[in-house]
Image (cartoon, rainbow, N blue to C red):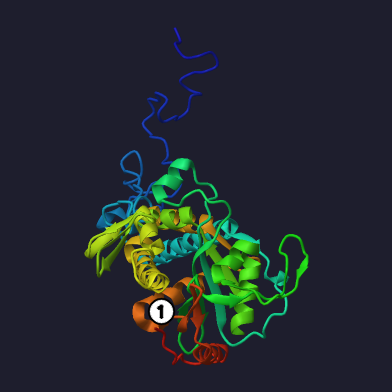
Amino acid sequence: MNDWPEGWSEHNRGSRYGRGSSAPHPESARVMRQVRRGQAAPPGQGGYGGPGPSAPPYGVPQQPSYGNGGGDYGEYDDGYNTGQVYGGPGDPGGRDLRPAPNWGRRIKRTALTLVILLVAASVGTYFWADSKLHRDVDLSKVIDRPAEGDGTNYLIVGSDSRAGLTAADKKKLHTGSAEGKRTDSMMILHVGSNGDTLVSLPRDSDVVVPSYKGSTSGKDYPAQGRHVKLNATYAEDGPTLLVRTIEANTGLHIDHYVEIGFAGFANIVDAVGGVDMTIDQGFKDKYSGADFKAGRQTLNGDQALAFVRTRHAFAASDLQRTKNQQKFLSALAHQVATPSTVLNPFKLYPTMGAGLDSLTVDKDMGLWDLGSMFWAMKGVSGGDGTSLNMPISGSTGGNLVWDKAKVKTLVDELNHDQKVTVTSN
């Protein structure tokens, strides 16, 4: 009985190596990819298929060789022993070696990222701050203005505006409840190339009200030779009449106007964490709420406001107050400019926000102008410039009379951006 499939026999199966053939001849060696056989043996030397006693069934077919380092194994041409299959170049262990980090490139990328973030933050801060400025004063309404001089003149005004204050706030800050607003402090800051100068204008200064155009009515008001306290002109028609009066009585052109109210001033001081300063002599004033002992101390917003407003505690009330205002502004400017404030966004942004929210400026005022004003004030207060009161020669009817000769010299030096030689009382 034949166990092979139909059509198959011992005869026609032939020599099929690996299929159960019982023939004495093994199947010929198959040609495999990436295998290179050695040199064929010469006839009669035992090569497969050659004549002689070494041919099958007595001989053994030549085996394929692998590798190129080695002796009897011949060559395997896939590059295994060169590390090109599993490992990186020159890796004898066949491991996947990653290239070393390029630290120079990483540092450059990190630096570029930081620069981009810094620029983005700076641009965002600029537009945020610029949007907070209240440009409500139109100096184009000021008539008959003197010619512009060299350098830049800022009129800085501290008003007793009670806008936005609750009854509790007014009581806390000792502002009273008077209607309207007046100026508690006025200063001219000259920024120039020959040194910056800060001139305080006493609020009780005797001035002549010039002709002017109403800021809201547009009506023309002719000059009548009226003598009033300087701060009364602000109460009469606001910033534009104040600027017009200062220009007419001095001959000095005012380039920019900056005003801050009670609440804003106190908020700035609190935002910066208080202001450290030394008070030479203790004093009290029930009107401003001042109650200070001599010595070094930290003033909060309420205390700072009381300090700069106090005048009833001094014999030379208005002149001493202007000196205290200059002294406090010096301390405040240095406090704001310290690294602990500038480099701390949790303190810097609240301080900037409190200041910008409370400022009223002219329509042409920009952030660069405001920055220039601040740094100049800081420099003057720190001893890099000159600070003085408007020179006084006497008084009349309770008003302080300016020394006309000294004022003329002072104005000439400012208009020509010269170093100020005038001194005050």
Residue found at x 48% / y 23%: 11
Does 157 sit left or right of 341 as displayed?
A: right
Residue found at x 46% / y 92%: 419
Does 288 sit left or right of 185 as displayed?
A: left
In what element is the residue under mark 1?
helix
Toward the top, the furthest residue is: 1
Instruction: Mark 1: give few (<14), some (14-19) or many (20+) Cα within 10 Å.
Output: many
Q: How many marks?
A: 1
Toward the left, the furthest residue is: 295
Residue found at x 72% / y 79%: 144
Does 191 sit left or right of 210 as displayed?
A: left
Q: Which x, y percent locates residue 380?
A: 41, 79
Q: Vertical placement of 244 versus 344: above or below?
A: below
Q: Vertical placement of 152 versus 76: above or below?
A: below
Q: Which x, y percent locates residue 299?
A: 31, 58
Looking at the image, which is closer to me, 105 or 18? Answer: 105
- The amino acid sitting under disc 1 is Val
Q: Which x, y percent locates residue 7?
A: 55, 16
Which residue was labeled with disc 1? 380
Q: Vertical placement of 303 versus 229: above or below?
A: above
Residue 21 seen by the camera: yes
Q: Which x, y percent locates residue 268?
A: 42, 57
